[in-house]
Image: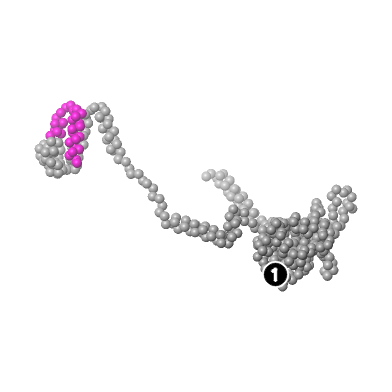
Amino acid sequence: MDRRTKIIIGIFVVVLLGIIITEVTRPKPINWKPSYTATDKIPFGCYVLHNELPTLFSNQEIKDVNESMYQTFFDRDSLERSNYLMVNNNIDFDDQEYNQLLSYVSQGNDVFIASSYFGYHLSDTLNVRVEADYAIQEDTVSLSMTNNKFSKEEFLYTKGMYNRHFTSVDSLNTTILGHITYLEEKLFEVDENKDRIRKLPNFIKVKFGKGHFYLNCTPLAFTNFYMLEGNEDYVAQNFSYLKNKEVLYWDNYKKAGRIVIESPLRFVLTQTALKWAYYLTLIGILLFYLFRTKRQQRIIPIIEPLQNSSIDFAQTVGSLYYQHKDYTNLISKKLNYFLEYIRSTYHLNTNTINEKTAKDLAAKSGTSLTETVALIDFIKYLKNKTHHTESDMIELNKKITAFKK
């Protein structure tokens, strides 16, 4: 690696480390997304409000609802009187929840809903309508209560607050409990003096059966940001209308920031028994895999033995001699090979082949003397012969093969 390449790599590493350090040390941006959940400490979460509920409702048992209100209302004691508290940006109900909600309130229970939208079914039943005046830029709005028992203090709000208000209510069953005051902008008017201050209801009480609905269309007033900005008294004044009951239900289910399981196994993961069975199965498979891989021997590769190329060479040379019909040369080489075999195996002198050689060879090889003598005589016959035939070659091969058995 040359010097120039090292410099380029060094510069790249330094830049990369600089980017990583900058990203790690950079302050985390504030999350202004409304969540309204009891565990979120972000500005528009409801962590502060949820922690203050035991203080605001000291005589009531606080119960968190983490499932559909239908199941909660279905399982509760019908003789028990309670309050139900919901805070979210938009709240809508399906048919089952809607019917259970109306039945719950008509039996003498109260429901407090802080939301920008109350759902089509509930809005139609209670005969209420909510609208908003949207402005180009954020402006200060003030919230106030109508009850003379409270001081005429106005609570100011700026960040993220919409000018939502009730434009239509059922005057026979509805009581206005609070107002929102804001500056209405005339976007298409040339004269700036056309802007005017408007004061409209944002908090109402609607009687339904033996109970009441308390509807507030400025839910951001109940979040961490404004609870810690000195507007906690506004929340306390809102909740003061809820009568002392045995239980206060805090809804954790209908929340914009609620964690929803998007996995195809969501039904399994929402059932306690199935969830633990699923987890135990995964753990069991993992343990089985770990222990099995440790105990199982690694596959031994197959090593092919080295081939005896000398045999192939001999066969090739023999085929060559056979094709040329040079039997004399082939017999000569075969005799030399056989005599070498006798010398190396039985340690006999083969320079002179005679009757004594035949007797010694028969004794050491265990072959009968007759066969050995016939073999030796045939070898001498071939040595004395100048021209050989194919039959000579075949006969020699038979005798040598018979001797070596």
Describe residue 208's horizontal placement relative to residue 191 as left or right: left
Residue under the point 82% across and 69% down: 150
**The one of 377 and 105 positioned closer to us in this rendering:** 105
Instruction: Check the image and report above or below for 17 versus 73.
Output: above
Q: Residue furthest bottom?
A: 59
Determine the image quadrant of residue 212: bottom right
Pointer 1 residue: 79
Residues shaded magenta: 377-405
List x then y, in percent, for residue 53.
71, 68
Camera sees residue 167: yes
Instruction: Check the image and report above or below for 226 versus 8.
Output: below
Describe residue 53's horizontal placement relative to residue 148 as left or right: left
List x then y, in percent, for residue 114.
75, 61
Residue under the point 77% across and 58% down: 125
**The one of 65 and 144 positioned closer to us in this rendering:** 65
**The one of 277 and 346 positioned closer to us in this rendering:** 277
- What amino acid is found at the position of numbered circle 1 in the picture? Leu
List x then y, in percent, for residue 175.
82, 64
Quadrant of image for the C terminus: top left
Determine the image quadrant of residue 225: bottom right
